[in-house]
């Protein structure tokens, strides 16, 4: 069975994509820590960071940096939490970088990641804001 990132890249599964090119796809997490939480993944399948080909390191990390910058512009985030899980706590067997918008006093403590949900139509609105900020 193909993982969900590969399904999104193939157009077999819908997602709120905010950035896509030949190397990287970035889309909103459907169960965000905070609204605007983006997952950045290589288009080419790699299970974990340890499997990522060297030539994709810069494109993936550069995309995560662009998304982190855009979250400030799009959502007024004061900063971001950027993380990669490798095997343990990795819910999808495809490398992905979490870029989570942060504000002071947002309640995120340590590695306890409470999840939230988008209201109807809200995911598309967040996606539009982030895509616009990415230019």
Image: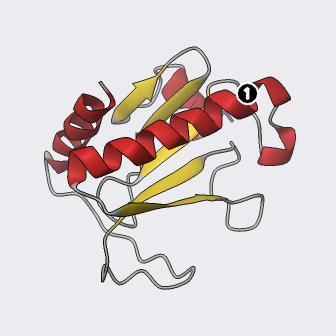
Q: Residue tagged by mark 1?
A: 56
Q: Position of residue 53 (x, y in %)?
A: 83, 29
Q: What secondary structure is found at the residue carrying circle 1?
A: helix
- Image quadrant in which the N terminus is located: top right
Can you say whether 117 is above or below 43 in the image? below
| Corner quadrant of residue 28 | top left
Residue closer to the observer: 55 or 52 = 55
The residue lying at 80 percent from left, 36 percent from top is 52
- Image quadrant in which the C terminus is located: top left
Can you say whether 44 is above or below 33 in the image? above
| Position of residue 122 in the picture relative to residue 26 (left or right) | left
Can you say whether 84 is above or below 109 in the image? above
The residue lying at 23 percent from left, 30 percent from top is 132
| Position of residue 74 in the picture relative to residue 87 (left or right) | left
Residue closer to the observer: 128 or 7 = 128
Can you say whether 27 is above or below 115 in the image? above
The residue lying at 69 percent from left, 44 percent from top is 95
């Amino acid at each position: 069975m193909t993982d969900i990132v590969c399904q999104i890249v193939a157009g077999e599964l819908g997602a709120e994509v905010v950035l896509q090119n030949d190397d990287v796809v970035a889309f909103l997490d459907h169960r965000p820590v905070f609204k605007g939480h983006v997952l950045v993944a290589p288009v080419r399948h790699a299970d974990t960071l340890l499997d990522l080909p060297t030539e994709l390191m810069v494109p993936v990390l550069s995309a995560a940096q662009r998304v982190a910058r855009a979250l400030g512009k799009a959502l007024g985030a004061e900063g971001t939490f950027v993380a990669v899980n490798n095997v343990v706590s990795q819910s999808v067997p495809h490398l992905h970088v979490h870029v989570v918008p942060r504000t002071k006093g947002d309640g995120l403590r340590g590695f306890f990641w409470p999840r939230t949900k988008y209201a109807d139509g809200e995911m598309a609105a967040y996606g539009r804001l982030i895509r616009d900020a990415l230019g």
